[in-house]
Image (cartoon, grey):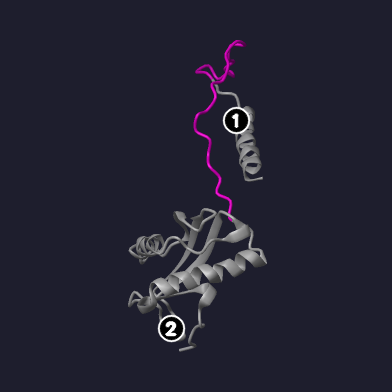
Amino acid sequence: MRALAILAAAMALAGCSAFKPAEKTDSGKAATSAPDEVASPRSEVPTVRLITAQTPAVRAYRKTGARQIYNAYPQRIYKGKIPPLVYAVVVVETDLDANGNVKNVTFSRVPSHAPEVPPKIAELIKAASPLPSPGRLGGHTYVDTWLWDKSGNFQLDSLTLGQRSR
């Protein structure tokens, strides 16, 4: 199914170039290409990352994965409700294989004022690998939001105790 989606996206992108406007020559007339000229295939096909749909099973796995990270770093977990303004909020996409091994860590939201935080998060996730086996979910992209305090402690959105009002 994933391969079919990638193939469809690649074909759609390739089709876009067939409709680009004709290039003009110095005289202002449209340039024509020789009829026997064949476009060379592009070796660079853009990769499309597919985020796993947030089904009940995926949401349940978010909590399972978060507990593994909490167990790996009990001293780094922010205790209680977090302050109203956390230092950094980072949305992390972790690609897992069918055994829970971390294959890649990317970010869909990073704080511009705290560029040091995402690399630290990636390091923590990779060091906690493997995460629990996703079971029937198989390999997928595990998405969670990290709420990072100035102290370097954190909570994960899937297990957060909430935020203080003051």
Q: Which mark is residue 9?
A: none
Residue 144 or residue 75, whichever sits in front: 75
Q: Amino acid at mark 2?
A: Pro
Q: Residue at x 44, y 82 (%)?
A: 82
Alpha carbons under labels 2 and 1: distance apart: 50 Å
Residue count near mark 2 (Cα–Cα under 10 Å), binned few <14, some 14–19, many ≥20: some
Residue 132 or residue 110, whichever sits in front: 132
Residue marked by disc 2: 83
Q: Residue at x 63, y 37 (%)?
A: 7
Label 1: which secondary element? helix
Q: Does 124 sit left or right of 98 as displayed?
A: left
Determine the image quadrant of residue 55: bottom right
Q: Amino acid at mark 1?
A: Ser
Residue marked by disc 1: 17
The C terminus: image quadrant? bottom left
Tell whether position 41 is magenta.
yes
Q: Residue at x 60, y 10 (%)?
A: 36
Q: Does 108 sit left or right of 18 as displayed?
A: left
Q: Residue at x 49, y 88 (%)?
A: 165
Magenta segment boundaries in residue numbering: 25-51
Residue 23 or residue 111, whichever sits in front: 111
Label 2: which secondary element? loop
Image spot of residue 39 (x, y percent):
56, 20
Tell whether position 163 is magenta.
no
The N terminus: image quadrant? top right
- Please tell me whether residue 30 is drawn above or below residue 156 in the rendered image: above
Q: Main secondary structure of the magenta part?
A: loop
